[in-house]
Amino acid sequence: MAALRAAHPTGTVGTAGSGLPTRRLVFGFPARGCPCWRRSTRLRARLNVAHVEGIHVAGQLQRKQRPESEVDGIGALHERIRKELGKRDAGPTAPAMESAEAERYISMVKQQQERGLRKLKGEKGDGEGGYGYRVDPYTLRPGDYVVHKRVGVGRFVGIKYDVARDSAEPMEYLFIEYADGMAKLPVKKSRKMLYRYNLPNETKKPRALSKLSDTSAWERRRTKGKIAIQKMVVDLMELYLHRLKQKRPPYPKTSGMEQFASLFPFEPTQDQKQAFIDVENDLTERETPMDRLICGDVGFGKTEVALRAIFCVVEAGRQAMVLAPTIVLAKQHFDVISERFSHYPDIKVGLLSRFQTKSEKESYLSMIKDGELDIIVGTHALLGNRVVYNNLGLLVVDEEQRFGVKQKERIASFKTSIDVLTLSATPIPRTLYLALTGFRDASLITTPPPERVPIKTNLSSYSKEKILEAIKFELDRGGQVFYVLPRIKGLEEVMELLEESFPQVSIAIAHGKQYSKQLEDTMEKFCLGEIKILICTNIVESGLDIQNANTIIIQDVHQFGLAQLYQLRGRVGRADKEAFAFLFYPEKSLLSDQALERLAALEECHELGQGFQLAERDMAIRGFGNIFGEQQTGDVGNVGIDLFFEMLFESLSKVEEHRLVSLPYDTVQLDISINAHLSSDYIDHLENPLELINDAEMAAQKDIWALMHFTDSFRRQYGKEPLPMEIILKKLYVRRMAADLGISRIYNMGKIVCMKTDMSKRVFKIMTDSMVSEVHRNSLVFEGDEIKAELLLELPAGQLLNWIFQCLSELYASLPALVKY
């Protein structure tokens, strides 16, 4: 009872002998005997008649059923919050950050982003203090899609000389076709407003051309894209801030590292040397855990970068984990690491895989837990709950895009506490996106080893004759052949064809569903050259380094992803011998537009070291995607790639303007004169109404998720609440949302609603841009330290509370676009 009074100091609780009717709860009005009690009674009676069903003024209590068609505002808010904020805020909330500390971290993030941009994109400043992506009109070709910042998406027609009305001299004009006409723009002026829609050489079409006569649709698209970008930036910011707060002592630089490097039998390329320096600096000079992407083609030396990082960590007495997507690749990593560390008998290397017996696995798990293994190599089995590490310091992930959703989430969880090094030839769009924005460190190895020669790629419709001819050519020169299909079904059929055509040649099948011993034996025999033709699925996509295999045939290429095809092609050409990749598809008429784009991109990226460029192409074809989920379509299509990037980096450069300082719940004042009476029959319906109200208040004090959880549980147990109880809940929701939004006081003066706040005008604009309801958006203005809304008429208290609740619900949806401290 005392707790309830403390939480509601202006309310009284009716109990026997209190002077109020027994078992009747009153909230928000003076107690009987107070000088203003009569006035409050009249107001209470008016509110009861007007707004609170289920309460009879004369004293006779009734419960009326609420119309089923009535909108459940609280339920709608729950749904919206889960959709807008669920991914980011559903977990445990991070501890609050001091303002000065936040400033320092934001500055670090901005510097990191600028370094990443300069390094990866090589962009120059455009003279306006930002990074420019505007297009040079003279580089456009007729038919290219372009974006005018104010008008929208159009199709470039050409540049022609024409004479303006007020001039005698001819000028160059740019002609752009839109949905409802042709635009004629002076070339000089258009430079500041024009952007490419696609990356160079891309042919992706926009959903529709914009209209010259109606730019409002374009403005809506641009605003939607802008808000989506701001949400991405804030997600990245909070992820990165969280990582920056993690600390670990830098690893010592030792002479042993130089000795280990000297054992590398090849002369490293310039890119490799830089990658070595980058990783060494991450480990030995920084206090925050490393999260670096090493992007380089197959055979360009990424593994050596990882080996040196492993040595640095293991020498300091910590464990290293090497994670590979397939057992074939894990086995190869194990062999390479074992050989490279053979000069260090004190460093123990182990391989954990599904090929081992139960007793072998148990033995390895025990050794990992006890710290007897220094380097543990394996597949996703290493991410299981049963694997307990003794002192894990480094995680090396090879080809992260090959792992499933759960494995990627588990990998992401490691990044907050240990150093992570990711190796990839063709990073997935999300990984590339993080690198391009500078939120993830990246080192590019684009220089091929001196002896490597480009792979000759032949793309054509399926032809049995071409396949047999290609295999015969490779066998005649003493080589081996990969024959890859997208599915296990069909491997036997190909086996029959090849056995019939090459009866004297050793041929074998390999796929992931085979018994472990059978698959291991097959791969070993192929590596030793005993098997000449390997018919397989994309199990051989990563890691296999077989010098004598220099022809690969890939059937039904349209069923593979672009990165997969690039990786598969990289299985050949590992030596100085000329290599061939034959890619076969069914009739082009059966292929989708995206499949045709992927094939064209692969054919164009035939030079060595183009995995990164190919990943950029893949990003343009599929979209950036949701970097925290598996959705692979982004908002690039709304505004085009160049404007998207410009908006992205503009948002990054002004990220401190996205800051929103939330307030403690107890400091928020809701000065709205409204009470709620719980009727006797509803009180009888509740088990312990006082405790329930107190629990609701405690949940609201914690956070919005606790309040939502309370309401959901309450409704499951007692059903949908009547209006008086809804008023109690809505007041709690209003104060909770106001606290999160940085609003300290809400009050009204007649038909003017005022919300006192310390937020910036920029934050207010982001919020209102995010609002779906035009009614609420158009009614709000920002004046001084208050958000104000002038209503058409002065509303009764119940309707006013509903209006405030809906308005805050709209504003609350913008929180993912704001950095909160």
Image: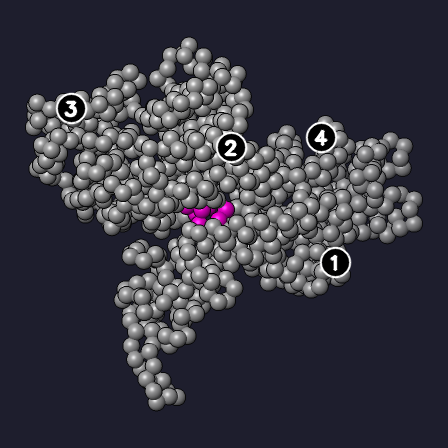
**Distance from label 2 to label 4 (Cα)?**
70 Å
**Of residues 100 and 156, which is closer to you in this image?**
100
Disc 3 and disc 4 in contact, CB within 8 angstroms: no
Residue 26, visible in the rendered structure? no
Along the polypeptide, which appears first: circle 3 or circle 4? Answer: 3
Along the polypeptide, which appears first: circle 2 or circle 4? Answer: 2
- Tell me residue 765's x, y (percent): 59, 60
Which residue was labeled with disc 2? 254
- Tell me residue 247's x, y (percent): 60, 36
Which residue was labeled with disc 4? 686
**Distance from label 1 to label 2 (Cα)?**
69 Å
Residue at 55% across, 47% down: 237
- For the residue labelled by badge 3, is the local secondary structure a helix, a strand or a loop? strand
Query: Pointer 4: residues within 10 angstroms few (<14), some, or many (20+)?
Result: few
- Tell me residue 281's x, y (percent): 50, 41
Disc 1 and disc 3 in contact, CB within 8 angstroms: no
- Which numbered dot is residue 507? 3
Which amino acid is tagged 4?
Answer: Leu
- Which numbered dot is residue 437? none
* Residue 240 figure quarter: top right
Residues shaded magenta? 431-439
Along the polypeptide, which appears first: circle 2 or circle 3? Answer: 2
Q: Is residue 265 magenta?
A: no
Disc 1 and disc 2 in contact, CB within 8 angstroms: no
Disc 2 and disc 4 in contact, CB within 8 angstroms: no
Which residue was labeled with disc 1? 748
Residue 548, visible in the rendered structure? yes
